[in-house]
Amino acid sequence: MTLAPETTDLKVQVRLGTDWLTVCDLIHLLPGRGVAALLPDGGQVALFRDRAGRLYAIDNRDPFGGAAVLSRGLTGTHQGRPFVASPLLKQRFDLETGECLDDEGVRVTAYEVRAAG
């Protein structure tokens, strides 16, 4: 995949409170694949980029299995909602809200995310 030169210097940033944390280069996010990044508190965020270029960031920890694996899940859409399916037990998590599409009582943290120069 070749990106336009103006996008190769962009950084992916996640909002933590009132600050933005730079977590990786945008070029490392391939559409349909996740990337995990370590947060200052020791937690992890799972980052995704869809084929339209939209960015998503959710907690990487699967609340059902307890492992930090959501970045390795399969992405898709259900009724217009982008999701990642956990590689453990296949529960789907909405990439915009963090809500589990298979158990409405469960959710992961969803982060505001942006690409910045």
Image: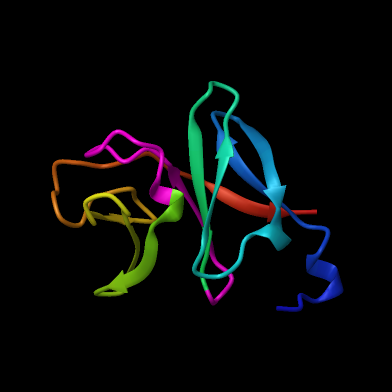
Image location (x, y in percent) of residue 114? 62, 53
What residue is at 27 percent from the left and 49 percent from the top?
Answer: 88
Identify the image quadrant of residue 108. top left
Is residue 46 depicted above or below 54 in this figure?
above
Q: Give the overall secondary structure of the magenta segment.
A: loop
Using residue 40 as the reference point, say whether residue 48 is left or right of it: left
Q: Is residue 64 highlighted in magenta?
A: yes
Q: Pinpoint residue 12: horizontal percent, then vertical percent.
A: 67, 50
- In the visual, does 31 lie left or right of 21? left
Q: Quadrant of the N terminus?
A: bottom right
Q: Residue furthest right?
A: 5
Question: Would residue 89 be found to the left or right of residue 15 on screen?
Answer: left
| Image spot of residue 36 (x, y percent) | 54, 45
Near-viewer residue (23 or 73): 73
The residue positioned 14% from the left and 41% from the top of the image is 105
Q: Which corner quadrant of the image does residue 29 belong to?
A: bottom right
> Is residue 62 in the magenta section?
yes
Task: State how the image is colored.
Answer: rainbow
Residue at the extreme front of the image, as rendered:
88
| The quarter of the displayed image where residue 61 is located | top left
Q: Is residue 12 shown above or below 44?
A: below
Magenta segment? 51-70
Q: Residue furthest top?
A: 41
State the residue at coordinates (36%, 71%).
76
88 relative to 18, above or below: below
Q: Residue at x 38, y 64 (%)?
A: 74
Q: Is residue 8 left or right of residue 53?
A: right
Tell me the quadrant of the picture where the C terminus can be found.
bottom right
Residue 65: % across, % down: 25, 38
